[in-house]
């Protein structure tokens, strides 16, 4: 496990935006400053027919990583039921395609049931490993931030296992600010895990 400070240094060494990240520059309030992403990645709302591919990818990361704090795969029927109960007008699920091929997905999910949190969402971005580092995660994230803005969400939260360096880097690249670290907040594969909390405020 790395403390976030070391993760930030790691990002600084791998990203052209490292200097800004190191200074923890607050993000601009709107989505206009987002990096440009590849035009070859198509982002569109998810439909029922996408769900098996989405759930397969999610189950892959459940089985192989600490990105999701469960080791129990979700059956397709349960995943479909969850999707059908989702208000996708406020909490969208999106699909990324490259040349018609499923490459990943994104979601804005409810942070908390209480009405005072209605304009706060948590994001998820998952990319098929064979498409990593081709701009897909960035395209999904950029689109999610635009959607959050259009829907009227005020704030996007991200809770990220501190071992998930690509995810931390992605969020920092897209203007999320580190808030702090929840020490020993989770466990998986017999290890106690720290969770980094980041946020991107869309408007105040
Ligand atoms: C995190 C994840 C979504 C990134 O997707 P991706 O398609 O590879 O990301 P992109 O190619 O669009 O990269 C966008 C930015 O993310 C950062 N990034 C992504 N992967 C990185 C890596 N391995 N090392 C360092 N930075 C990385 C970079 O800042 C990059 O911007 P740059 O290319 O201008 O440097 C992908 O690695 C993934 O699915 N990981 C497993 C699941 C997960 O942890 N999801 C997040 C949970 S919310």
Image: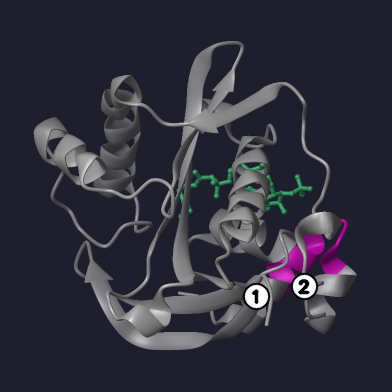
- Overall secondary structure of the magenta section: helix
Q: Residue at x 67, y 51 (%)?
A: 146
User: Dot 2 corresponds to which residue?
Assistant: 29
Q: Residue furthest top?
A: 99
| Residue count near mark 2 (Cα–Cα under 10 Å), binned few <14, some 14–19, many ≥20 | few
Residue 20 in view: yes
Give yes or no for contact between labels 1 and 2 (Cβ–Cβ under 8 Å).
yes
Residue 162 in view: no
Q: Indicate the position of residue 202 as horizontal and vertical percent values.
A: 67, 70
Q: Look at the picture and state if 85 lies above or below 127.
A: below
Mark 1 element type:
strand
Quarter of the image containing the N terminus?
bottom left
Q: Indicate the position of residue 159 as horizontal and vertical percent values.
A: 44, 71
User: Dot 1 corresponds to which residue?
Assistant: 201
Is the C-beta of the residue carrying label 1 under 8 Å from the nearest atom of ligand 1?
no
Q: Residue at x 19, y 46 (%)?
A: 82
In the rendered structure, the answer to whether residue 110 lies left or right of residue 40 reads: left
Q: Kindly indicate the quadrant of the structure image that contains residue 131.
A: top right
| Residue count near mark 1 (Cα–Cα under 10 Å), binned few <14, some 14–19, many ≥20 | many
Distance in Å between CA atoms under marks 1 and 2? 7 Å
In the rendered structure, the answer to whether residue 100 lies left or right of residue 203 reads: left
Q: Kindly indicate the quadrant of the structure image that contains residue 60.
A: top left
Q: Kindly indicate the quadrant of the structure image that contains residue 58.
A: top left
Front-most of residues 196 and 120: 120
């Amino acid at each position: 496990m790395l403390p976030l400070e070391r993760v930030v240094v790691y990002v600084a060494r791998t990203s052209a935006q490292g200097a800004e990240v190191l200074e923890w520059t607050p993000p601009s309030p709107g989505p206009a400053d987002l990096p440009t992403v590849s035009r070859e990645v198509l982002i569109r709302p998810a439909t029922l027919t996408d769900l098996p591919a989405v759930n397969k990818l999610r189950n892959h990361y459940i089985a192989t990583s600490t990105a999701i704090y469960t080791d129990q795969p979700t059956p397709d029927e349960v995943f479909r039921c969850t999707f059908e109960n989702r208000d996708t007008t406020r909490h969208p699920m999106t699909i990324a395609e490259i040349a018609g091929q499923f490459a990943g997905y994104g979601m804005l999910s409810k942070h908390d049931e209480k009405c005072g949190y209605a304009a706060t969402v948590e994001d998820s971005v998952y990319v098929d490993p064979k498409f990593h580092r081709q701009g897909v995660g960035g395209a999904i994230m950029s689109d999610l931030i635009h959607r959050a803005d259009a829907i009227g969400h005020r704030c996007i939260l991200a809770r990220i296992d501190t071992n998930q360096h690509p995810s931390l880097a992605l969020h920092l690249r897209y203007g999320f600010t580190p808030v702090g670290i929840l020490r020993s907040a989770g466990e998986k594969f017999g290890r106690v895990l720290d969770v980094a909390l980041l946020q991107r405020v869309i408007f105040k």
